[in-house]
Amino acid sequence: MKMNKRSFFLLVFLLAFTPLASPAESRKMFIEPQNGFESYISAAIVKKQVPVMMIGNRDDAELLLTSSVEGQQESGASKFARCAFAWCLGINGTQTASVQLVDRKTTQVLWGYNVRKQGAKNYQSSAEAIAKHLKEYLSKHPQNP
């Protein structure tokens, strides 16, 4: 089928101004403060294009994302001991981050995820893993996460 110029430009115009996901499809989510880790999570959510609308007012949110992050440094003596026996992996410590997605109205925990990364200050990598798995969950449960 051959397309004339007018039809082609109309198609390009419609595709350019049609949003990929309408705001009605994305749910309003508030990320609970956690000593700055929430900013890493929100940046990762934007980067991974998670289908939620992040808002700054907890009372207007449909979903709440709570998080906990803990870094554990290794002492100098244990670093030396581990490397002396050629097992230097993880000498910079570890970081564990956990999140829960909660329905604000019912307080039901809808989804949870836990990630452990090498390096006691690996916030960006942990947040990106969280965003990736949150996106997977929301794509499987678009109407009622």
Image (cartoon, helix red, strand yellow):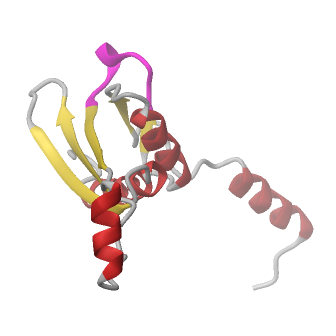
Quarter of the picture containing the N terminus is bottom right
Occupied quadrant, residue 35: top left
Total residue callouts: 0
Q: Residue at x 88, y 72 (%)?
A: 4
**Is 29 situated left or right of 43 in this image?**
left
* Magenta-drawn segment: 54-63
Determine the residue positioned at 32% across, 18% down. Answer: 58
Identify which residue, 81 or 34, lies in the foreground.
Answer: 81
Which residue of the protein is positioned furthest toward the right in this rendering?
A: 5
Closest to the observer: 117 or 29?
117
Vertical placement of 92 versus 106: above or below?
A: below
In magenta segment, residue 40: no
Query: Where in the figure is residue 52, as x and y percent of width and height?
Result: 41, 41
Residue 51 locus on image (x, y percent) = 43, 48
Above or below for 15 versus 91: above
User: Is residue 38 in view?
Assistant: yes
Of residue 26 and residue 15, the one placed in the foreground of this image is 26
Measuring from the top left, give residue 136's x and y in whole percent: 32, 62
Q: Is residue 139 among the parts visible in the rendering? A: no
Residue plotted at (34% across, 62% down):
117
Residue 135 lies, in percent from the top left, at 37, 56
